[in-house]
Amino acid sequence: MTTNTQATSMPAVVHALTRAATDALLIELRHPDSGGRLPEARPGDHIDVRFGRHLRQYSLYSSATDGRYLICVKRERGGRGGSAALHDELRVTDIVQVSSPHNRFPPVRGTRTLLLGAGIGITPLRAMAEALWHERDRFDLWFYAPDRDSAPLLEYIATRPYADRVHLRLSTQGQSARTALPDELEHPAPDAHVYVCGPAGFMEHVRARARKAGWADEQLHQETFTLDAEASAALSEGDEFAVRVASSGETYRVPSGSSVADVLPANGVDVDLSCEQGICGACLVPVLTGIPDHRDEVLSEAERTANDRMTICCSRARTAELTLDL
């Protein structure tokens, strides 16, 4: 899935802000023109949101058939400041820039669906649950949280017509993913699917248990916006190379342990960044000369072979120099 935030960016107005949990904020975005509608979205879609200098990706809390977007943002302690800015600075009537919806977490129809979400990872799964309910499909939604106060929008979910299919599991009651996974996960069915979203450790544990029980990889689906620390650090390792900015002609050295996205802003070159781990595509930049060492999870094999674009947050160079169309 390729993201081009600049090409699809559009304004949206903050219509409402609602406290969704101890550290979670529900943000309702609408078209800035009265009667206007934002592009329709599907279950599992996410959008890029730019607020000030921050560009971040958020799953949509609903399928957005009514022309508005709902996102739920957790304040990330020790993060890079994007979630904190939305919590502390965003106000009703503010204008933000959003992309059209993207989807790398599409639901697949089957005889049965298991949805497992932890914390803010419940967001895309709630949208899937709504769609599955309306389509009269068989599903169950397992919701893991430390306690009731930190479970995003629990009161709202509890009022939905499928509330009897929602299974809340709280760590404070000894019901973590390590002790309270659904029994159905131990009994794979050939036409069933498992969807998981949440912290990396939670998703890894669920997938490992499912594989051990015999689920095939094509039956297991997850949405990832961050990499583990070891994988993230490995992205920036490699030989030093030079990167040339076409518009200015300036050339900068990119040493091992640093990325193009580290070096260019440090030298006053403005670039778009979001995940900074090669999994969103916000930092894709055209390559004019040189051959990139692609390390992202965004470009297809054909797009990598073309070598005319690269994710500057993680990809490096196979040649001594790259010229970027910046």
Image: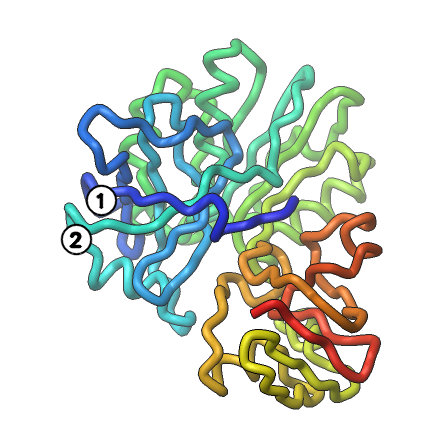
Which residue is at a point 34% across and 35% down the rendered structure image? 69
Q: Which residue is mark 2?
A: 91
Which amino acid type is marked by label 1? Answer: Val
The vertical placement of 5 against 12, above or below, is below
In which quadrant of the rendered image does the C terminus lie? bottom right
Measured as percent of width and height from the top left, residue 177 is found at: 57, 48
The vertical placement of 231 against 163, above or below, is below
Residue 218 lies left or right of residue 61; in this view the side is right
**Mark 1 in CB contact with mark 2 (< 8 angstroms):** yes
Measured as percent of width and height from the top left, residue 207 is found at: 70, 46
Which residue is at a point 64% across and 64% down the rendered structure image? 311
Which residue is at a point 66% across and 77% down the rendered structure image? 233
Q: Which mark is residue 62?
A: none
Quick one: SS at disc 2? loop
> Which class describes the residues within 10 Å of circle 2: few (<14), some (14-19), or many (20+)?
some
Q: Which mark is residue 14?
A: 1
Residue 86 lies left or right of residue 304; in this view the side is left
The vertical placement of 324 against 257, above or below, is above
Give the mark count: 2
| Residue 119 in sight here | no
**Cα distance between the residues tagged 1 and 2:** 7 Å
